[in-house]
Image (cartoon, grey):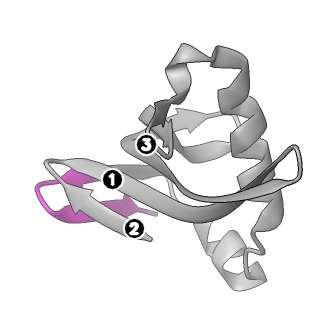
């Protein structure tokens, strides 16, 4: 689920955490913008929550959760190919602007 609010992209992913045999439904929410890396343009969250837990309080958890979420997603080949052509990305007001 994607939303733009106050010049920030918010991405929410419903998940089920399995903790000691208990299944807990939560929403993982990341808010931020975009950054240029050697791999191209990437989403760069400024804040990251698992349910109501602010992940910055547990720094090692952020990378682990990000990898798990990305590994669980199937990105269509045509979308992946198109995203590699993006040279700049930003948010202006309520508009996502992509340059190719």
Which secondary structure, mark 1?
strand
Q: Quadrant of residue 66?
A: top right
How crowded is the residue under tag 2: few (<14 C-alpha within 10 Å), some, or many (20+)? few
Quarter of the image containing the N terminus? Answer: bottom left
Q: Residue at x 49, y 46 (%)?
A: 51
Which secondary structure, mark 3?
strand
Q: Verify CB contact (< 8 Å) between mark 1 and mark 3.
A: yes
Q: Earlier in the sequence, mark 3 or mark 2?
A: 2
Q: In this rendered view, identify the residue nearer to me: 64 or 4.
A: 64
Q: Earlier in the sequence, mark 1 or mark 2?
A: 2
Residue 23 visible from this viewpoint: yes
**Position of 54 relative to 22 (above/below):** above
| Image position of 44 (left or right of 79) | left
Q: Verify CB contact (< 8 Å) between mark 1 and mark 2.
A: yes
Q: Residue at x 37, y 62 (%)?
A: 98
Q: Earlier in the sequence, mark 1 or mark 3?
A: 1
**Position of 78 relative to 62 (above/below):** below
Marking on residue 34: 3
| Image position of 66 (left or right of 87) | right
Marking on residue 36: none
């Amino acid at each position: 689920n994607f939303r733009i609010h106050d010049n920030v992209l918010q991405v929410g992913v419903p998940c089920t955490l399995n903790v000691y045999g208990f299944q807990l439904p939560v929403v993982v929410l990341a808010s931020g913008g975009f950054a240029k890396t050697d791999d191209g343009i990437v989403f760069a969250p400024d804040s990251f929550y698992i349910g109501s837990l602010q992940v910055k309080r547990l720094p090692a958890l952020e990378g682990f959760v990000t990898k798990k979420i990305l590994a669980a997603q199937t990105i269509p080949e045509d979308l992946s190919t198109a995203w590699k052509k993006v040279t700049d990305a930003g948010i202006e007001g309520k508009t996502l602007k992509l340059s190719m």
